[in-house]
Image: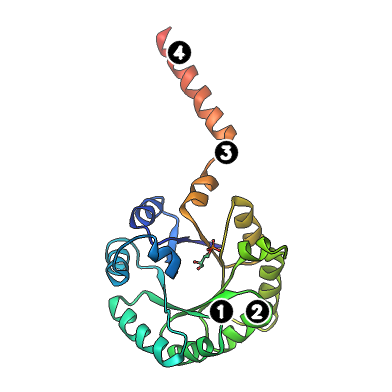
Amino acid sequence: MKFFIDTANIDEIKEANALGVLAGVTTNPSLVAKENVSFHDRLKEITQEVTKGSVSAEVVSEDVDGMMKEAEELIKIAPNITIKVPMTLEGLKACKQLTDKGVTTNVTLVFSANQALLAARAGATYVSPFLGRLDDIGQNGMNLIAEIAEIFDRHAIDTQIIAASVRHPMHVTEAAINGAHIATIPFKVIQQLVKHPLTDQGIEKFLADWEKANQE
Ligand code: E4P
């Protein structure tokens, strides 16, 4: 499983990239709205200064023509822009048209296996099932990842599953076990993945022993 970062914050993206683990970036309108910057300028910064990996940019139109117009402008920014479309009838049409043009797509707001299968058949490069939001309403987000992975495997579908709406480190481990190809993770959770109390204690002990030995 690969790691994407789920943010539009340039400092977080740069910091995660410096760790050497970053394969791509996902953004959404809520994440961009928090940043108070021009969306296109931010996408330029990310694609020119940080990563050649997939950078998902979401359209906000609700009809296929509007989505296609937005997508045309977004793909001019860089070749690694992936167009994120919502899992709707119009979003599927846009997914199909973009795929036919050779544009990579990420079908977002996926909450059922049928939605994922439809998106895949419309040519989606990626589908994004939202784990945390399903957990929030008392459904099991991880079961959805497992179901989609099984269906894609059984039918030799090469659309990649992005585990999205990741809230904590266990989501990451379980998404990997259940067959997600990618997890898109908020910066805070990436930091949590690194931490282990025994690592911290180990470092403390090594340093204390080192200082003691050098004082003797
Ligand atoms: C995925 O691409 C979305 O940006 C994201 O994971 C949504 O997560 P949230 O449910 O924490 O907003």
Tell me the distance, in whole angstroms, between the alpha carbons under discs 3 and 2. 34 Å
Horizontal and vertical percent position of residue 90: 51, 90
Instruction: Name the quadrant of the C terminus.
Output: top left
Residue 82 picture quarter: bottom left
Horizontal and vertical percent position of residue 131: 62, 64
Tell me the distance, in whole angstroms, between the alpha carbons under discs 4 and 3. 26 Å
Decide which of 87, 213 is in the foreground and name it. 87
Tell me the distance, in whole angstroms, between the alpha carbons under discs 1 and 3. 34 Å
Q: Secondary structure at mark 1?
A: loop
Tell me the distance, in whole angstroms, between the alpha carbons under discs 2 and 1. 8 Å
Whichever of callouts 3 and 2 sits on the residue coming sooner in the sequence is 2
Horizontal and vertical percent position of residue 136: 66, 61
Whichever of callouts 1 and 4 sits on the residue coming sooner in the sequence is 1
Front of the two marks 4 and 3: 3
Q: Name the residue beneath numbered marker 2.
A: 152
Q: Name the residue beneath numbered marker 4.
A: 213
Q: Amino acid at mark 2?
A: Phe
Horizontal and vertical percent position of residue 45: 28, 64
Question: Which of the numbered marks, if any, corresponds to residue 196?
Answer: 3
Q: Which residue appears at 45% of the width and 55% of the height?
A: 21
Whichever of callouts 2 and 4 sits on the residue coming sooner in the sequence is 2
Tell me the distance, in whole angstroms, between the alpha carbons under discs 2 and 4. 57 Å
Q: Are marks 2 and 1 in contact (CB under 8 Å)?
A: yes
Q: Are marks 3 and 2 in contact (CB under 8 Å)?
A: no
Q: Which residue appears at 53% of the width and 22% of the height?
A: 205
Q: Amino acid at mark 3?
A: His
Q: Which residue appears at 47% of the width and 85% of the height?
A: 62
Q: Name the residue beneath numbered marker 1.
A: 159
Instruction: Name the quadrant of the N terminus.
Output: bottom right
